[in-house]
Amino acid sequence: MFQFFFKKDTRVEELIFTYLETFQLIQKNFYKALTCCMAQPRCEEFDFLMSQTHKYESIADDILDEVNSLMYGKALIPDFRGDIMNLLISLDKIPNLLERALFMIRYQRLVIPEPLVPDFQDLIRISIESCELLSKQAELFLKNEEGTRSLMSTIDSNESHCDHIERRIISKLFESSDIDPFLKLQIKELVINVGDISDQADRVSKLINILTLKRRV
């Protein structure tokens, strides 16, 4: 499947798909952690899921380091080394955002105010959906298969939807007179960070589309 890119070693191919599998495990643990904290704030399960997210994020970083070393050991056609590493590095910004959101909740001891929970749940759900679609889009690109453009369109639509939800949450947050002013600033920071997930997914999705077009030239 990587014949278009690789001249020899299949180790890079294996590592890239292992990275994508790890990326999906990070998403799943993040989503479970957020669902848990909204149902039962400050529970032990949240701490476990946060540690799992961190574990897989560290594994993903190690995989990227090995991919980088192998690529510049001439396992990849020179013209495409930069493109593939740029894609992976851009993709890897998403796990950092996921982990940062969990750290904010854990170490600032944040509890989402009840009136904001439904919108916050929607924001998380759609953001993770974009990440799942992005994983599929990346796989299609790497396998040189059709369908990347339609996935990009859905991810772009999700990003716009998340922007609307993010603004709605922040508006409700500051309209409320029942929420402590300092907590408002903390929740706003968290919401913006979560909103960045769909933004980054959209940027990576558009990058994949550009690389797909470039490959066809």
Image (cartoon, rainbow, N blue to C red):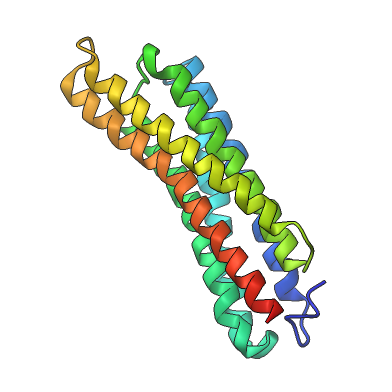
Q: Nearer the viewer, residue 86 or 141?
A: 141
Reply above or below: 19 against 164: below
Q: Say whether residue 81 is visible.
A: yes
In percent of the image, x 49 and y 43: which residue is there?
Answer: 159
Query: At which x and y percent is residue 177?
Result: 19, 11
Please name the residue shown 73% across and 80% down the image.
5
> Taking the image as drawn, is residue 21 in sight?
no
Q: Residue furthest left?
A: 181
What quarter of the picture does the N terminus occupy?
bottom right
Residue 52, compared with residue 37, is above or below; it is: below
Residue visible at 68% across and 88% down? 77
Q: Is residue 11 left or right of residue 54?
A: right
Count of numbered circles in the view: 0
Which picture quadrant has residue 125?
A: top right
Whether 32 is drawn above or below 22: the answer is: above
Residue 35, quarter of the rendered image:
top right
Of residue 39 and residue 139, the one placed in the foreground of this image is 139
Occupied quadrant, residue 172? top left
- Quadrant the C terminus occupies: bottom right
Image coords of residue 176 (percent x, y): 24, 14
- Residue at figure coordinates x 69%, y 58% from the top left: 148
Q: Position of residue 97 (x, y in %)?
A: 43, 47
Residue 34's x, y, as percent?
50, 28
